Amino acid sequence: MTHYLIRPDGAGVRASLFELEADIMEVVWAHDWDGFAVSDVHEALLAEREIAYTTVMTTVSRLYDKGILDRQKDGRRYLYRPLFTRESFLRALTREVFERLPASSQDEAIAFLVERVEEAGSDELDRLEALIARRRSEIGEEDE
């Protein structure tokens, strides 16, 4: 994943993507497109607001340059496809933020996670237990 600027005023996908980039990715993920043309995104965005085709084209191209979309030539146009699901994008973003922290800040981040566990409900604890069990299983396989 390409390195992204973290935007403190944004949440989720908008923490690393500019507003229109995030809107485009949300459209792509909502339509569950494996492949799409700029015109597909433009048409979907037009249902919500007035926007120029060239603006969408430039922004889609920027998402390709950032390594979020892949593209393939199809005649005179490009067909794009997302390289991440919404969930895998957020996971990669979170991982990148954590790994770029200095060691002392990583300790603070872990302390924050522990605080969140203390506040977690039953469903969250079940998810955490499943993640820990999966990781233990992976480690067990590596040790053999």
Image (tube, grey):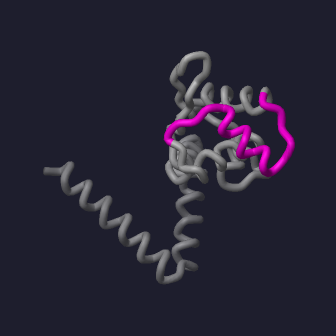
Q: Which residue is drawn at 61% across and 45% down?
A: 28
Q: Is residue 44 above or below residue 56?
A: below
Q: In this view, does 29 lie above or below 121?
A: above
Quarter of the rendering containing residue 66: top right
Name the residue at the top extreme: 76
The segment highlighted magenta reads 34-53
Residue 78 seen anywhere in this rendered image of the structure? yes
Q: Which of 29 and 93 is in front in this view?
A: 29
| Rendering coords of residue 115 (x, y %) | 57, 72
- Is residue 49 left or right of 107 when viewed as pictured? right
Residue 52 is one of the magenta-drawn residues: yes
Q: Residue at x 56, y 28 (%)?
A: 79
Name the residue at the right extreme: 50
| Rendering coords of residue 78 (x, y %) | 58, 24
| Rendering coords of residue 43 (x, y %) | 72, 41
Q: Residue at x 57, y 41 (%)?
A: 100
Q: In this view, does 5 lie above or below 138?
A: above
Q: Residue at x 52, y 74 (%)?
A: 117
Q: Which of 91 and 71 is in front in this view?
A: 71
| Rendering coords of residue 122 (x, y %) | 47, 83
